[in-house]
Amino acid sequence: MSTYQEFIQQNEDRDGIRFSWNVWPSSRLEATRMVVPLGAVFTPLKERPDLPPIPYDPVLCTRTSCRAILNPFCQIDYRAKMWTCNFCYQRNPFPPQYAAISEQHQPAEIIPQFSTLEYTITRATCHPPIFLLVVDTCFPEDEDLQGLKESLQMSLSLLPPNALIGLITYGKMVQVHELGSEGVSKSYVFRGTKELTSKQIQEMLGIGRGAAAHPQQQQRGGAPGNQQQLQLPSNRFLQPVHKCDMNLTDLLGELQRDPWPVAQGKRPQRSVGAALSIAVGLLECTFPNTGARIMLFMGGPCTQGPGMVVDDELKHPIRSHHDIEKDNCKYMKKAMKHYESLANRAASNGHIIDIYACALDQTGLHEMKFCPKYTGGHMVMGDSFNTSLFKQTFQRVFSHDQKGEFKMAFGATLEIKTSRELKVSGAIGPCVSLGVKGPAVSDTEIGLGGTCQWKMCGLYPTTSLAVCFEVVNQHNAPIPQGGRGYIQFITQYQHSSGERRVRVTTVARSWADASANIQHISAGFDQEAAAVMMGRIAVYRAETDDGPDVLRWLDRMLIRLCQKFGDYNKDDPNSFRYSENFSLYPQFMFHLRRSQFLQVFNNSPDETSYYRHMLNIEDLTQSLIMIQPILYSYSFHGAPEPVLLDSSSLQADKILLMDTFFHILIYHGETIAQWKAQGYQDMPEYANLKQLLQAPLDDAQEILQTRFPMPRYIVTEAGASQ
């Protein structure tokens, strides 16, 4: 089995893709009997330091209904300088600049190891990234606001000097700050109770048509002079960082808590919905279809105006899962409608909405979940802006790769091409459908279907989509022996440097007749990819279906898979056997159905939305940790080893390290804790105890350095309160 495991790992490292089935059933009927749908967990921008972008445009198939990109699976006729598309079999001439190609001089795009290749679009104009800060000022304590101000001031030093930045603050009122005015602070004040249209915002801020026109001109690849237009102060609210750095640092430093008094037994009047609406409207008017990021910071729920989730009476608690079940939520549906419409507007313009919510009570993430979900934004939940947990997480938003470039991309679209035996059923992840019909679109929808193109406004090296496919080849139309199916993923995006890039991943897998060669198909099953895909589908269903129905569906699917691929004697449970590459799948399902993604007991609606959001965007490895946490045991008897998530793993002379993705926990057994309390580790003759205590701390530190958002870090021992 190691050969298949190696094949799966190589494909993930090279192409950022894992299929649930690596040998595909050759007919529609057989594919439906496989139980787990044919699908892939795909990471479009998986980090590849060995893959520099090539500085020319991709070569497209000339057939208008195809337009697939030249790839290593195409047949090449070197003498005639022609290539045959592996999707539609159209013969295409090479462009003139390829005249010198031969079997010895091949362009990168037809070399087998470059099944993933990145192009820099040479004609596209560079756009600097845009950041619009939307900051809450209704904090019960000065420390919270102070912590947030420090983080924001720190972030200015991490932005590229040409990035554009803007500031909106809100409490009872919403203030849009001018950054172009020297020496005097000017801001436009809006009532927090009023819903404004994009046109009204445009007129009130005086940002008229002139400001809105030039991004569009640049998109069409206009004159070089357009690049300078972005640097001009045509827009007083969004300025280059190098121009307003000092001004903005002072402005943030002077921010005070909202001056409106809060009566006893009342919540502060917080206009989150109005502030976010103004932010979306401002970017819509000035930089449509340009990479931009709205960063919303909230210290509590919206209590007035559009998007209100709870009133200002503290005696009225914010809704719980029980209230949602009983349809006892006065504001929820209207608020969700408001935030979903803002999310759709932002997504259609390629703008990202991040939400950083830090408070001890719920802040309304449940109602606002569409904003990061549709736009690929970050959702961060914490207790306070003044904690190291938030500060380190926020710093990580601006992390750089080895070349010193931001690990974030803007305004991406993903297009999928398939060979004629396959169609796309849908995608589940941080994206919106572009509603593009085509020959590769299936009638069966799983997730966001009915399209072969999706928009992802925010993209990071770990952002992943679960994509489901349908085999449409009929049972009576056999595929020739050795035939292969092809899928091409084309991701166009704005790089953080401002360049437009296209990353193309083309993959091929073999077909097999399930009625004759079921063992070939079962040998290519990837239980980890299947578990993550089923987890995403289950969470997608849980958003609309009843919880118990989703659990029953998961159970049914597991039973059917066991019936299909397990070996057993009837009426003898002890005889059941699974092959090695299926053996962990039931365990993944066991943990998934008991996880916080599907069980809402003891979690608030905000927490449930947060956990589901993280499962919906992370890559396969991190998603598996969320579904089934990792537990390592450290002892004097050798290297750390993985152990079962079971109370039998708690032993007096061992240390445990548990990683649940959201928490990192180190547990000292009773004997170890006593030795530590008596200070044995500080004595030279017990150096081995010191090493044992240090090993899990080092491993935990390694995890903490790479994970976003920062997990909670807990060190405890036998009998302690944790």
Image: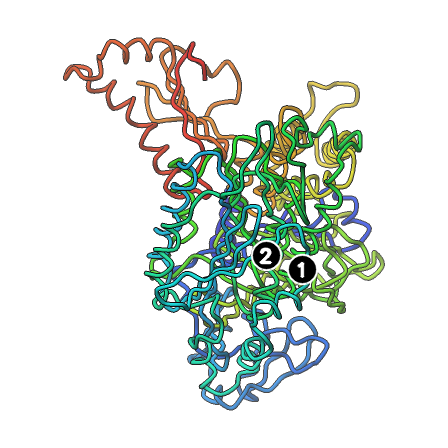
Against 530, is 324 above or below?
A: above
Q: Nearer the viewer, mark 1 or mark 2?
A: 2
Against 328, is 420 above or below?
A: below
The span from disc 1 to disc 2 (Cα, nearest Å) is 9 Å
Front-lying residue, 648 or 277: 277
Front-lying residue, 65 or 487: 65
How many numbered circles does the render carry? 2
Residue indicated by mark 2: 190
Mark 2 falls on what kind of element? strand
Against 409, is 699 above or below?
A: above
Q: Position of residue 528 (x, y in %)?
A: 58, 40
Q: Residue at x 62, y 46 (%)?
A: 524
Q: Residue at x 52, y 59 (%)?
A: 176
Q: Label 2: few (<14), some or many (≥20) within 10 Å?
A: many
Quarter occupied by the C terminus:
top left
Q: Pointers 1 and 2 in contact (CB under 8 A)?
A: yes
Residue indicated by mark 1: 196
Q: Amino acid at mark 1?
A: Leu
Q: Is residue 211 left or right of residue 652?
A: right
Front-lying residue, 209 or 362: 209
